Amino acid sequence: MYKKILFAGFVAAVLLSACKKQTEEYPTATISDYMPLEPGKYIIYQLDSFRYSTQSLVPLTITYQVKFQVDALITDNLGRPAYRIYRYIRKATTDPWVSDDTYMAVNTGTALEFVENNLRFVKLKEPITQDYTWKGNTFINTTSDTAAFDFRYLDSWDYTYDSVGAPLTLGGINLENTVKVAQIDDVIGNPEDPNSYTEINYGAEYYAKGIGMVYRRFLHSEYQPPTNGYNGYYTDATAGATFTMIEHN
């Protein structure tokens, strides 16, 4: 009996040691791994932005270059350490950079909050593991009064990790370790029917280890069908953009 107890204890110790060793060898990635923040760090993207002109079903696409550069460590309105990020824009590589927007990023230790146009998104959240899901737009008012009208389409998005640690190629840039954040892929109505109301929402971002966000695609479209002799059209709320990294430091 004593030998059986001793053997069982030995097996348990071996299993515990193996589990501990595996945990030490394969730790879960952190927010800082996929979104390093320090003053002076920048990423340059090709930005392909499109909208529909008034009463037109033909999209207008405009291409820019934009640079997101971490400016300084500051304090947010909750007293937490945060980083101010400037965005610069230019039409061509020969044009000078022009500052056109300011953002803020907060690494809480378990989540990355990103403030854009006074909207706070939870872009990343630990643990960074396959299929982990969270409400990325939880801080955005999408349900009350007129303030919510413009942002109602952001309601209840489930951000989900996919392809954790997978390689990715962007143009001629090979990235060894990336993670996809699938935000939404939703269609209301029938896009093939010009007489049907249609709404499309799509959002996805890719982050590369040691770099930050390397790709983003966003689309929100609202199509109103013909009524009372008026042609069908896309509303002013319709917009889309694709950010593709072309350079970083």
Image (tube, rainbow, N blue to C red):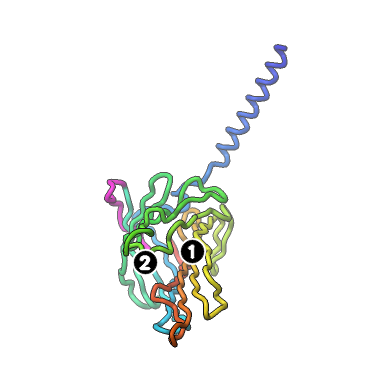
Residue drawn 46% across the image and 59% down it: 213
Q: Which residue is depicted at the point 49% across and 66% down?
A: 201
Q: Is residue 66 magenta?
A: no
Magenta range is 68-80
Front-most of residues 154 and 211: 154
State the residue at coordinates (45%, 81%). Answer: 233
> For the point 54% across and 59% down, which residue is it?
175
Percent across and percent down for residue 142 are: 38, 59
Residue bearing mark 2:
150
Amino acid type assigned to the residue bearing label 1 in the image = Gly
Amino acid type at mark 2: Asp
Q: How far is the residue under mark 2 from the one under mark 1?
A: 17 Å
Q: Residues within 10 Å of mark 1 (few under 14, many from 20)?
A: many
* Left or right of 153 in this view: 164: right
Along the viewing direction, whichever of 18 and 39 lies nearer the viewer? 18
Q: Count the numbered circles shown.
A: 2
Q: Which quadrant would residue 239 be assigned to in this image?
A: bottom left
Q: Nearer the viewer, mark 2 or mark 1?
A: 2
- Residue 124 vs 49, above or below: the answer is above
* Residue lying farthest to the front in this orientation: 228
The residue carrying mark 1 is 203
Q: Which secondary structure class fits the magenta region best?
A: strand
Q: Secondary structure at mark 2?
A: helix
The label shown at residue 109 is none
Question: What element does badge 1 sit on?
Answer: strand
On the rendered structure, is 149 left or right of 243? Answer: left
Instruction: Write down the quadrant of residue 140 in the picture.
Output: bottom left
Point out residue 87 in the picture as x, y percentages from the top left corner: 34, 65
Q: Position of residue 232 (x, y in %)?
A: 46, 82
Q: Quadrant of the C terminus?
A: bottom left
Instruction: Pick the quarter of the image with the N terminus.
Output: top right
